[in-house]
């Protein structure tokens, strides 16, 4: 972790107010690999927890059934309960085996923007540094026969408190996250964040798009059929856009496509599908998540056709933020990524951090290599010049592979 981040974390820790310190020795620990059996108590904990939508039972159970299981990851859910049997914390983890080495990881892999525990807010408020270390050390000891622990992409703040896993040696993740606080009307937010001239330009583009293709309309897919059609368009547009950029196709695997489609079609309680139409054409689409007072802007796409010059993606984003203000969300979360356009909207940035722990000789070598690889990735991503070069090289490599194939 760099010096400025370390100072910020130390300041947060010094200012954090602890109430009713929790003793790790008082907690009762258990583990299971049966995610389905935990549905009731997991969802009950969600309602009083500090966590993100990526730690909900619906998200994790669907991710594992479609992706984790296919990748050979064995669920290893660690639970901590108070003596009266009340579940106070749940760690949605799994054991990943590669080249004969077993690593304890968060379930969700690259598809979960934020990773971490589901932890009772009252427990989080009462955790001192010593109690936190004892609590997680005891939890990790329940996992036998592993070589390393790899915990990545965890927000440094959890429920406005310092993330408990920062008690371990850590490093910053390759990218941070950004969000917009919704405390005004959309018109007031737009004026404060973007200015009147920006809105005037977008309105002009909206009018020109309507003239070229037909009336524009923002739609939230509410029926099963509408949600199915929206996710189909989104996948098609996203794959085309990634191919154009020379980036990896996140939807190349049928298991990944099934995961996003299942959440879109069967879990409207957390998944929101929306489209932006011009005439009969869907020119932009978004796969978002909603949980508590937060909207998560996860997968956005736009057409690769002639209408791209009218900025349909920006027009759709405006509609989504306005919809979020009307719905009463407190935060519009742009999730992970340091793209420049987020600076136009966001008023809050949060670092993400990684923790690597080697438990055997081979495990320590694995953890060291993984940590160094992530540090190098961050170095490249945080340098505009190097990141630009990396993207050009990625595109050339993709074109070469495509041509060769």
Image (spheres, rainbow, N blue to C red):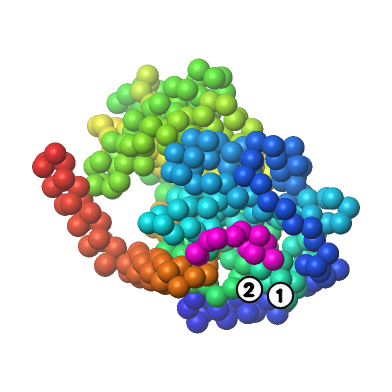
The picture places residue 367, in percent across and down from the top left corner, at: 44, 68
Compared with 75, 117 (above or below) is below
The picture places residue 298, in percent across and down from the top left corner, at: 48, 44
- Disc 1 crowd, CA 10 A, few/some/many (<14, 14-19, 20+): some
Q: Residue furthest left?
A: 404
- Disc 2 crowd, CA 10 A, few/some/many (<14, 14-19, 20+): some
Q: Is residue 162 left or right of residue 334?
A: right
Q: Is residue 366 left or right of residue 127?
A: left
Residue 238 occupies quadrant: top left
Element class at badge 2:
helix
Mark 2 or mark 1: whose residue is earlier in sequence: 1
What residue is shown at x 53% (from left), y 36% (from top)? 65
Magenta stretch? 138-148
Q: Is residue 242 left or right of residue 233?
A: left
Q: Are marks 2 and 1 in contact (CB under 8 Å)?
A: yes
Q: Which mark is residue 167?
A: 2
Compared with 3, 248 (above or below) is above
Residue 388 seen by the camera: yes
The picture places residue 104, in percent across and down from the top left corner, at: 53, 58
Query: 169 or 35, which lies in front?
Result: 35
Is 147 part of what is drawn in magenta? Answer: yes
What residue is shown at x 88% (from left), y 53% (from top)? 84
Query: 40 or 277, which lies in front?
Result: 40
Residue 339 occupies quadrant: bottom left
Residue that label 1 marks? 129
């Amino acid at each position: 972790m760099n010096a400025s981040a370390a100072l910020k974390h130390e300041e947060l820790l010094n200012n954090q107010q602890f109430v009713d310190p929790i003793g790790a020795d008082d907690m009762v620990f258990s583990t299971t690999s049966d995610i389905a059996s935990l549905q009731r108590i997991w969802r009950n904990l969600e309602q009083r927890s500090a966590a993100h939508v990526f730690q909900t039972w619906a998200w994790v159970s669907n991710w594992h059934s479609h992706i984790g299981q296919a990748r050979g990851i064995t669920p290893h859910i660690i639970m901590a309960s108070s003596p009266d049997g009340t579940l106070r914390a749940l760690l949605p983890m799994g054991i990943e085996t590669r080249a004969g080495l077993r690593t304890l990881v968060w379930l969700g892999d690259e598809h979960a923007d934020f990773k971490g525990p589901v932890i009772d807010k009252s427990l989080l408020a009462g955790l001192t540094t010593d109690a936190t270390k004892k609590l997680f050390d005891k939890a990790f000891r329940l996992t036998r026969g592993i070589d390393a622990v790899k915990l990545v992409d965890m927000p440094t703040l959890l429920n406005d408190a310092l993330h408990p896993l920062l008690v371990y040696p850590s490093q910053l993740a390759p990218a941070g996250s950004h969000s917009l606080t919704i405390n005004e009307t959309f018109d007031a937010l737009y004026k404060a964040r973007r200015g009147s001239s920006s809105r005037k330009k977008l309105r002009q583009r909206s009018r020109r798009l309507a003239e070229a293709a037909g009336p524009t309309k923002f739609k939230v897919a509410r029926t099963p059929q509408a949600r199915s059609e929206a996710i189909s368009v989104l996948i098609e547009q996203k794959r085309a856009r990634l191919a154009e950029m020379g980036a990896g196709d996140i939807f190349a695997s049928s298991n990944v496509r099934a995961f996003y489609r299942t959440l879109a079609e069967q879990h409207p309680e957390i998944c929101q599908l929306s489209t932006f139409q011009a005439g009969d054409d869907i020119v932009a689409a978004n796969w978002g998540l909603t949980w508590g007072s937060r909207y998560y802007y996860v997968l956005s796409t736009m057409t690769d056709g002639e209408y791209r010059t009218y900025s349909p993606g920006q027009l759709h984003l405006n509609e989504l933020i306005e919809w979020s203000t009307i719905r009463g969300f407190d935060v519009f979360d742009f999730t992970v990524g340091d793209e420049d356009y987020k600076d136009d909207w966001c008023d809050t940035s949060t670092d993400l951090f990684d923790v690597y722990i080697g438990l055997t000789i081979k495990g320590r070598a694995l953890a060291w290599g993984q940590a160094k690889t992530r540090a190098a990735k961050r170095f490249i991503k945080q340098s505009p010049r190097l990141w630009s070069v990396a993207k050009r090289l990625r595109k050339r490599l993709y074109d070469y592979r495509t041509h060769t194939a």
